[in-house]
Image (cartoon, grey):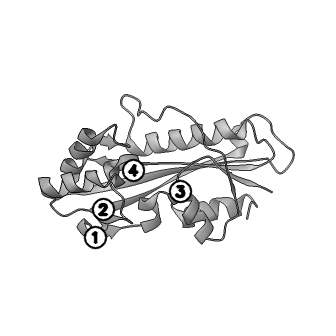
Amino acid sequence: MTIVLASASPRRQELLRNAGISFTVQPADIDEAPLAGESAPECAQRLAREKAVAVFRNNPNSFVLGADTVVAIERLILGKPRDAEDAARMLRLLSGRTHAVITGVCVVGPVVSGQWSVVSKSNIQIASSTTLVTMCAISEDEIREYIATGEPMDKAGAYAIQGRASRWIPRIEGDYSNVVGLPVALVYAMLRERGAV
């Protein structure tokens, strides 16, 4: 049965390919803003679910994988930066501190006893993975130079651990692939449980 990734993220696609998981891509178009009072795990899981459900409605005979990654520092949720100024604000917040990277994952698919064209609780799995990331202190010049590369602009928390920002990250606690954008071991376990892989 087909697995549809409800994301245009090249990083998520690469992680799935590297793990030997076959899939097609159909990005979901949803509002990714956090809701008032929502915790980071709640936000990541809700957005992953909304993405998966939106794509499943057009692919009721497939397994749809939705994911959303947020960065949290204290109670503040950092998504993708709006612009260079917002990216600089985020990087200043993370500089010299430890933060959490949370990826919500949702798999929606057909129920074994029949095909569902609508979403029900019985055909949705939702989980999340959290990784703690420690970042060195970053100077204003380094922040400015990093933003000029364009790398931070489509990344939660305004950095890519697999890119230039790796030089500022001496320690992580948890799943590295989660910080890149998809906790591969968790996703594989969820898909395997449903018989999708």
Name the front one of labels 1 and 3: 3
Q: Which residue is mark 4?
A: 155
In terms of secondary structure, where does tag 2 sit?
A: strand
Using the numbered discs, state the Cα–Cα distance from disc 1 to disc 3 in whole angstroms: 24 Å
Which residue is depicted at the point 37% across and 55% down? 101
Q: Judge from the rendering whether residue 91 lies leftward or rightward of residue 39; answer left or right.
A: left
Q: Judge from the rendering whether residue 63 lies leftward or rightward of residue 142; answer left or right.
A: right
Name the disc covering residue 171, or none.
Answer: 1
Name the residue type under label 4.
Lys
Tell which circle, 3 or 2, labels the residue nearer the N-terminal end. Answer: 3
In terms of secondary structure, where does tag 4 sit?
A: loop
For the residues bearing labels 3 and 2, Cβ distance under 8 angstroms: no
For the residues bearing labels 3 and 4, Cβ distance under 8 angstroms: no
Task: Give how far across and how far down residue 154 sits, in percent.
Answer: 41, 47
Name the front one of labels 2 and 4: 4
Name the front one of labels 3 and 2: 3
Name the residue type under label 3.
Pro
Tell which circle, 1 or 3, labels the residue nearer the N-terminal end. Answer: 3
Tell which circle, 3 or 4, labels the residue nearer the N-terminal end. Answer: 3
Q: Which residue is mark 2?
A: 133
Using the numbered discs, state the Cα–Cα distance from disc 4 to disc 1 in whole angstroms: 19 Å
Name the residue type under label 2.
Val
| Vertical placement of residue 134 versus 113, above or below | below
Q: Which residue is mark 3?
A: 10
Using the numbered discs, state the Cα–Cα distance from disc 3 to disc 4 in whole angstroms: 11 Å
Using the numbered discs, state the Cα–Cα distance from disc 3 to disc 2 in whole angstroms: 22 Å
